[in-house]
Image (spheres, rainbow, N blue to C red):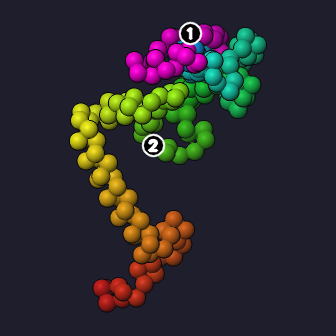
């Protein structure tokens, strides 16, 4: 198995979109800085991770960099002392060395895509609304209201179904039992 040859920490000033920029600049200006971690194995395989060094639960330290050099990445997978970005890069590298997606180390694939979101400090409602419209791809307030109403109708339908049949999430019987006597003549 190939060991880790090098670790690179690549700072990236990702910036903010214009509306959040004016608010984030007050107190959390350094959250615009991301750090991409590139871990290279002796055989040339590369794993990537990323972190916000001014926010994350575990920054990548020089000590952590030294700790992984010359080591088998599979021995480091669960080492939270590495810092978020380096640990993520080690997982990515291990998956590439094993020629499997990382999820195979911990279980079944759960989704094809992962939603991405962000947070901004204390923006006024108008700025949040404008960001939501832009992110949704909807161009007018009318379109936003129409989509919200559709969502409301779907949620009300779900509530009525739950009220009618009980708590579906905790149901352990068969679908026929859930329907009750009303369906005995349907077969």
Residue visible at 44% across and 72% down in the picture: 163
Q: Quadrant of residue 175?
A: bottom left
Position of 145 with respect to 24 (left or right) is left
Position of 106 with respect to 181 (left or right) is right
Q: Nearer the N terminus, badge 2 or badge 1?
A: 1
What residue does disc 2 label?
A: 111
* Quarter of the rendering occupied by the C terminus: bottom left
x, y percentage for residue 28? Answer: 58, 19
Against 160, residue 17 (above or below) is above
Q: Is residue 99 visible?
A: no
What is the spatial separation of the Cα atoms under label 2 and label 1, in whole angstroms? 29 Å
Q: Is 115 colored magenta in this rendering? A: no
SS category of the residue bearing label 2: loop
Q: Which mark is residue 10?
A: 1
Viewer-side label of 2, 1? 1
* Quarter of the rendering occupied by the N terminus: top right
Against 139, residue 65 (above or below) is above
Q: Quadrant of residue 60?
A: top right
Against 182, residue 124 (above or below) is above
- Rate crowding at label 1 as few (under 14), some (14 to 19) or many (20 or more) other CA atoms within 10 Å: few
Q: Is 18 colored magenta in this rendering? A: yes
Q: Which mark is residue 44?
A: none
x, y percentage for residue 100? Answer: 52, 33
Question: Mark 2–mark 1 contact, CB under 8 Å?
Answer: no
SS category of the residue bearing label 1: strand
Task: State the count of labels.
Answer: 2
Residue visible at 37% across and 62% down in the picture: 156
Q: As rendered, which of 176 and 151 lies closer to the eye? A: 151
| Highlighted range, magenta | 1-29
Q: Quadrant of residue 70?
A: top right
């Amino acid at each position: 198995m190939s060991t880790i040859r090098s670790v690179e920490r690549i700072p990236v000033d990702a910036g903010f979109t214009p509306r959040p920029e004016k608010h984030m600049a007050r107190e959390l200006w350094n959250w615009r800085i991301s750090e991409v971690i590139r871990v290279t194995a002796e055989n040339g395989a590369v794993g990537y991770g990323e972190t916000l060094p001014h926010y994350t639960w575990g920054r990548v330290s020089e000590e952590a960099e030294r700790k992984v050099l010359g080591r088998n990445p599979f021995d480091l997978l669960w080492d939270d002392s590495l810092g978020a970005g380096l640990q993520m890069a080690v997982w990515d590298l291990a998956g590439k060395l094993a020629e499997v997606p990382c999820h195979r180390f911990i279980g079944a694939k759960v989704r094809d895509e992962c939603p991405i979101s962000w947070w901004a400090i204390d923006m006024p409602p108008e700025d949040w609304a404008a960001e939501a419209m832009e992110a949704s791809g909807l161009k007018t307030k009318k379109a936003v209201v129409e989509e919200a109403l559709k969502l409301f109708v779907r949620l009300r339908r779900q509530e009525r179904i739950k009220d009618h049949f009980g708590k579906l999430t905790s149901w352990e019987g068969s679908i026929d039992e859930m329907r009750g006597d009303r369906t005995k003549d349907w077969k």
